[in-house]
Image (cartoon, rainbow, N blue to C red):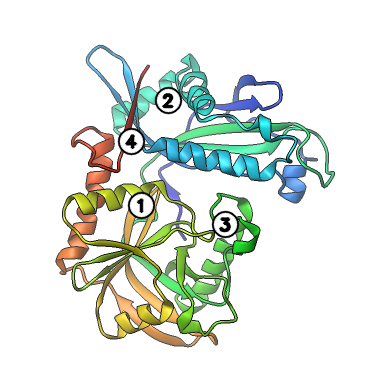
Amino acid sequence: MAKFEGVKWASRQLRFLLDEKKVELLEAGAKVYAVSRSLHYGLFLAFEGIRFYCRKDDRGRLHLNFLNWYDNLERFRRGIAFNLSQEQQPLVPSLEELENLFIHQYLGTAEMRNFLEEMAQRQAQGYLRPFTVDEEQSIGVTHPGKPAIRAVACLYDRYLGEPFNGVVVPYLVRAVRANGTGWLKLGINYLMSIKAIDLAREIDSQAAAALFLDDQLHRPLEERAITEWDSSCALFGFDDGSVVKIQESPLILPSVTIKGIVAILRDWGVKVEERELLYGELIQAVKDKQLVVACSVGTAGILNRCHQLTLLGKDKQILATHLGQPKHPLFERLGEARARYWAIYQEKFLPPPGINLYKYVL
């Protein structure tokens, strides 16, 4: 199962009360009420994952670098808004308020200095995890009485990694478009993701990821569309050198990382199509050996290439099995795109059109 490895947490977490506009820095292990709407019913639970890089210059100043991170902040805002009532919508922070909160009132504080110093010394990957919780002590089934943002940060070595095995799980649905939750980072989506991986391991004990189809269960299996991996978006590379990015829809989380990877590939002259990919087309491409690689693309892991993908039918029968083609030029090119993406954080390369580098000096 996809997971973080080599994690080290910062010693402080942030708490921001939306109604009072009050900021506090708490101990890393600070708790919430055991009797809470967020814990008991999953109300007002939204979250975001934001990769960042920290370096130290020759004057001792710390530099924080983010790619396209206003997209992260906007996605987090949508999650907050979804969980609040109509009357509470004015509580949703603006992009600028979130930027100030996370940079200047959390990461830029004296209490976080040692953590960032270690990040810079190790040249480690950084991960900022803001999330929401109801700070009121209540189990009522209502909107949050005391909505708050919390945030924690960590550094880590890797996430998911290569090679990994995946299984297409057509008999579970990650999200339903009518509910408007598929494009948000909400807990229920990821509970279904974990259940899907459990089922995938019934077929392949080494499976670390599950690939979902859409919510159109009334359609023939071959006419249903590929959506996402369990916790990341999907790119598919084909023998003709082209790449397919699944087009965004109410079922697709708008990935910040995939936007950057696509920008890099297009800058290199790789043909990237953003379109629907039907399961029947994928099955045929595997049988004809036209699929070079299926990639998992997400914040923490950037891009990982699938070694083996098992395609299932309705009754869990194996329809086809894809093996990645590591000797194909496109397979290698996608690996290079992953390295380039991280190198842009480190300012070793200028970002191509479609990637915005945000830099803060502390």
The one nearer the camera, 58 or 65, is 65
- Relative to residue 203, is residue 91 drawn left or right? right
Type of the residue with mark 2:
Phe
Identify the residue position indicated by label 3 in the image. Answer: 190
Type of the residue with mark 3:
Tyr
Q: Earlier in the sequence, mark 2 or mark 4?
A: 2
Q: In the rendering, at what x and y percent does residue 73 appear?
A: 49, 36
The circle drawn on residue 258 is: 1
- Quadrant of the frame with the C terminus: top left
Q: Earlier in the sequence, mark 3 or mark 2?
A: 2
Identify the residue position indicated by label 2 in the image. Answer: 115
Q: Is residue 156 above or below residue 274?
A: above
Type of the residue with mark 4:
Ala
Q: Are marks 3 and 2 in contact (CB under 8 Å)?
A: no
Q: Nearer the viewer's eye, disc 2 or disc 1? A: 1
The one nearer the camera, 22 or 327, is 22
Q: Nearer the viewer's eye, disc 1 or disc 4? A: 1
Q: Earlier in the sequence, mark 3 or mark 4?
A: 4
Q: Is residue 93 above or below residue 40?
A: above
- Relative to residue 33, is residue 307 drawn left or right? left
Q: Nearer the viewer's eye, disc 3 or disc 4? A: 3
Q: Earlier in the sequence, mark 3 or mark 1?
A: 3
The circle drawn on residue 333 is: none
Decide: few, some or many residues near mark 3? Use Cα within 10 Å; few <14, some 14-19, many ≥20.
Answer: some
The residue shown at (18%, 60%) is: 332
Identify the residue position indicated by label 4 in the image. Answer: 124
Q: In the rendering, at what x and y percent does residue 153 appear?
A: 48, 33
Distance from disc 1 to disc 4, alpha carbons, whole Å, reads 21 Å
Q: Are marks 3 and 1 in contact (CB under 8 Å)?
A: no
Decide: few, some or many residues near mark 1? Use Cα within 10 Å; few <14, some 14-19, many ≥20.
Answer: many
Task: Give residue 108's quadrant in the image.
Answer: top left
Distance from disc 2 to disc 4, alpha carbons, whole Å, reads 11 Å
